[in-house]
Amino acid sequence: MTFQIALSFEDGITRFVECNTDETVADASYRARINIPLDCRDGACGTCKSLCESGTFDAGDYIEEALTDDEAEQGYCLPCQMVPESDLVLQIPTTSAVAKTAAGSYTSTITEIVRHSDSTVGFTVSVDNRADLVFLPGQYVNILVPGTEATRSYSFSTGPAVESASFLVKITPGGLMSDYLSLRAQVGDTLELTGPMGSFFLRSGQRRALLLAGGTGLAPLLSILEKMQTDGVTRPVHLIYGVNSDLDLVELEKLSAYAASLPQFTFDYCVSDPGSAAPNKGYVTSLIEPGHLDGGDVDVYLCGPPPMVEAVRQHFKNVSITPTNFYFEKFNSAATPADSPASSIEETAADTYEIGEEHLPVAESDAQFDARMALELGALELTIGRLTPAQLTEYRILAENSATSIDRDHFTDAAAFTETNALFHDFLFRCTGNDILLQAYQRLEVTQLMNRVLRTADWVDEHVAEDHSRIVRAFEQNDRAAARELIVQHSKHAKSTMRRAITDARVSVASVMARYFSGRFDDRVVVVTGAAQGIGRSVAERISAEGGSVVLVDRAELVHEIAAPLDRSHSVTADLETFEGAQHAIDSALRHFGHVDVLVNNVGGTIWAKPYEHYTPEQIHAEVTRSLFPTLWTCRALLPHLIERASGTIVNVSSVATRGVNRVPYAAAKGGVSAITAALAMEVAQYGIRVVATAPGGTEAPPRVVARGPGAQTDEEKLWYQQIVDQTVDSSLLKRYGTLDEQTAAITFLASDEASYVTGTVLPVAGGDLG
């Protein structure tokens, strides 16, 4: 007997392997020549740690340093040790390129074309070697447009068990696939497919599901419904389908058929056109009812255009509900005039789809609890034996109040508990009379966050309130040893309660981090360039979460969409390869906010990847213009303002690629960024201005929405790029790529007052590669 293991990589590629019942997932992967991250093979290092999204398994033997109990509870696993007990879906923490694998390619033949309306066409294909095309319901493939070298990405509208494969396409005038389907497509035509791809797919479970579709975003949800029907799923499911006009409505008969065959499936639809004949006019959010969300205990699957995704997210915020899991797939129009350059598979997949998920983590940072406990022990030493009788009485009352607000299993008064719990924890610090100690405690403690989550949770560890009374008793008896032991034990109980409460109250880890670092950028205006994607976007979102006002600058129109959900944000489109563009961006920031405190120069990136002798003079010029001049121009545009204010910080993003292969012009440009940092810091230190830089190494990031390169890679170019990947990993002492969060943490540290004594320095953030 074998089980099917879906390996979902960070770049959207999904590969499937067959795993025997006595075989580890890692062994099955390597047998299939898929090199998932692996060092020890004995559960000791944690290198292969992955997240199991679906299925059951025997976790095997490992040490806690490799996989903690908390991580195991969340579904993390070690493929080098785990043996499957069912089919599995694993999130592998690397890209398919690093794993030296790729999506499969398939030849298919069109067997049916259905022109639903002038705006929508459906088509069905038979696939050669159909058994080899294994996909998860909701995933997509890239399809080569006949007669071109361009691909377009489309989700399956049929389930994995259906012999044929079907798709829905919105007809966009001028679009390559739209023109083909409208004018030339015939039954019998051959189509080349590449995939499957994407992390938007049905997860197992019995929790209520809410499916939201915009236009042809209905396709992957039809695939999900087909899978539910095939598997006899009985979980409650409601679908809301929205379109712009009556002509866009398709497959209503199929939805009615699912409503008749799936015992707990219902659906509604709406049309935004006020003149529609549909029973519901408006947008999808107008049809979301409280019962569909079940107080937040719901899995949401959404496929639609970016504005719809953001509107739904805002709706959840407005009703103060965060779904347990929120899976979304944004799609943009891939219309390209017929005479436009062809796009590569990588570009098209990125241009057309942006897939994401938001979950509610179980774990909270142990470091915060440890720091909190250390400060509480310090407060104990300053107060035990020194509290007045009146203070001891107040302490006892606070402990009793928290105890009376809960019973052994549930809250009876969540609001009362959260208030008395906060007062109890602040009490000793107030008694010290040391405001600095109290402020340090309030900065690190998680009580504020607990207040938020416990107000909506329905459970608390009864030991937490019992601990309060025991701690007070130790103070009354002047028993220092007992008090210390009780505070340590109480920290463990609080940690357990916090984790359970975060799960029940559905608070994201971003909330934890925003609480921990809140205030670093209060009253600060920060300009972030290259903010439409990647590191720049991550930095802008992090600074916004930490209280800053953010100006997001990019030459891609997408930047306005990224800025929209951020508080205190302003977005500017500008070509920073010119001084005029840089000046326009800075002027716009100053007009909007009145001043600028911090500039993060993030624009740049390799356009081509090849040995230097293969570069043309035009390509060399383009590389340097892309990765050097945006920093040079933007520093120059902002500098007079910073000098006038006699304060400010500039954080440049350089690269350790200054010592790397197949990127000499890019390396030269980034070397220039490092030189700008050192020289400019010397000039402007007299004005109280700091200039610093990070030098990122290889960084894993979602597929680019706006591609850097000009087109599809040849086999030789792919080999050259793989040489960069291999050299980057080999040069890192940690033998891996970094994450966006790791790069963002370094940049925001340097941008904050925490780095106030750092200037003229380039900080490598590359796992030990110093560049």
Image (cartoon, rainbow, N blue to C red):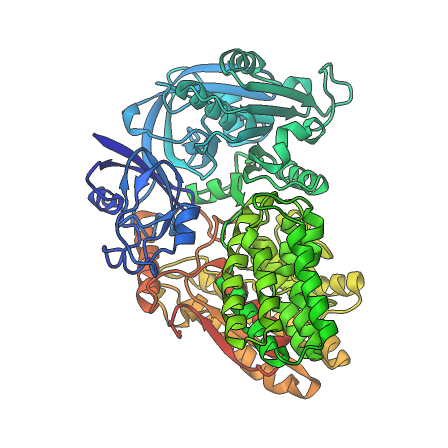
Outermost residue toward the front? 477
Q: Which of the pair 238/753 is nearer the observer? A: 238
457 left or right of 12 in image: right
Task: Look at the picture and state if 66 lies above or below 686.
Answer: above
Q: In which quarter of the image is residue 723?
A: bottom left
State which quarter of the image contains the N terminus.
top left
x and y, in percent, of residue 705 in the image:
53, 47
User: From this viewpoint, is residue 400 visible?
Assistant: yes
Q: Residue at x 55, y 82 (%)?
A: 760
* Residue in front for this viewpoint, 406 or 315: 406
Q: Residue 187's spot in the image, x, y percent?
A: 41, 15
Q: Residue 37 in the image: state x and y as whole percent.
A: 31, 54
Vertical order, 183 against 636 (above or below): above
| In this rendering, position of residue 667 left or right of residue 402 | left
User: Total label count?
Assistant: 0
Can residue 524 be seen here? The reply is: no
Residue 577: x and y in percent read: 60, 63
Specify the farthest residue to the bottom: 686
Quarter of image, res 83 = top left
Relative to the observer, which residue lies in front, 246 or 424?
A: 424
Residue drawn where x is 62% and y is 32% of the image: 294
Q: In the rendered view of the protein, which quadrant contains the C terminus?
A: bottom left
